[in-house]
Amino acid sequence: MSIKIITDSAADLPREIIDKYNIRVIPIYVFLNGKEFLDGETLKADTLYKDMRNGKIYKTAQITPETFKKVFIEYAKNDEECIYIAFSSGLSGTYQASIIAKEEVLEEYPNFKLDIIDTKCASLGFGLVVYRAALMLEQGKSRKEIVEAIKFYSEHTEHIFTVDNLEYLYRGGRVSKTSAFIGGVLNIKPILDVEDGRLVPIEKVRGRKKALKQLVEMAQERGINLKHQIIGISHGDCLEEALIVKDMMIKKFDCKEFIINNITRCAS
């Protein structure tokens, strides 16, 4: 009996990894002026960031129980075992929507084997958990082994990131309007973390270069044996700076393996 790895587009995995490991990715909904787009499918990152720079405001919406139900039934009909690896429940209602869908599908297909795991991770930190699960599946590991590993990596993944513009954190309700204004005037770059599935500001740095350097310093404080870890670097249409961070990680820790990809959703 085959096992299928399912996730959602908040994982920010590069297309080549998705295709290579045959990962099913359910897209998050994105809206602009009432028009619906599918994250990473009908809306690409370059278009999104170009529009945002021109003042357009995109909004995201969680995947619906109906969408999950349709996907799950595809595999239930074929008697396939599935593992759905979910975006943090602290940042989206997507996980809960998948639980609702699972309950409905099991009424019709009571023997359907489906594990749903709330990673409490975000972006490429989330994606790394999915990637490790896909690697284990390719190695022939059992569903139980994969599920246990997903839970372990979910609990031990560190997220450290910064933003250049507090405006989008304000729009998303992460900081106050006053903080966003003062931060812009003083060139404040917050360092944030994901704790128990939620975004938490942990430090403030003045200037972009100092912020990027601080990310690397904090990776050293939090990381274990970084040389042999897979390092994920996600960015909001600033590949040049992502590569600067990569270079700093190589020089400081001799890291070997990186996954770098654009975030394809708006921050609001």
Image (tube, rainbow, N blue to C red):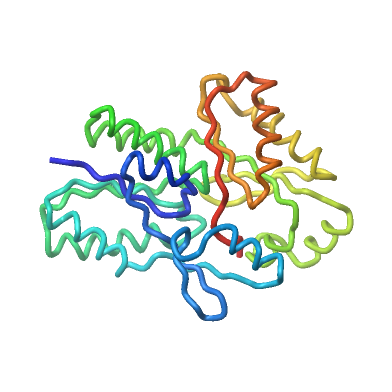
Q: Is residue 52 above or below residue 117?
A: below
Locate residue 226 relative to residue 202 in the image: left or right: left
Position of the C terminus by quadrant: bottom right
**Residue 160 position within the rendered picture, expressed as x and y whole percent measured from the top left:** 63, 40
In the rendered image, the residue lying farthest to the bottom is 34
**Residue 59 position within the rendered picture, expressed as x and y whole percent measured from the top left:** 56, 70
Residue at 62% in and 44% down: 193
Position of the N terminus by quadrant: top left
Q: Is residue 14 above or below residue 34?
A: above
Q: Is residue 174 above or below residue 21?
A: below
Locate residue 10 relative to residue 19 in the image: left or right: right
Residue at 70% in and 42% down: 240
Residue at 52% in and 81% down: 34
**Residue 65 position within the rendered picture, expressed as x and y whole percent measured from the top left:** 32, 67
Q: Nearer the viewer, residue 103 or 112?
A: 112
Q: Nearer the viewer, residue 122 or 3?
A: 3
The quadrant in which residue 224 appears is top right
Q: Nearer the viewer, residue 237 or 78?
A: 237
Q: How many marks?
A: 0
Residue at 65% in and 23% down: 250
Locate residue 37 relative to residue 231 in the image: left or right: left
In the rendered image, the residue lying farthest to the right is 186
**Residue 221 position within the rendered picture, expressed as x and y whole percent measured from the top left:** 66, 26
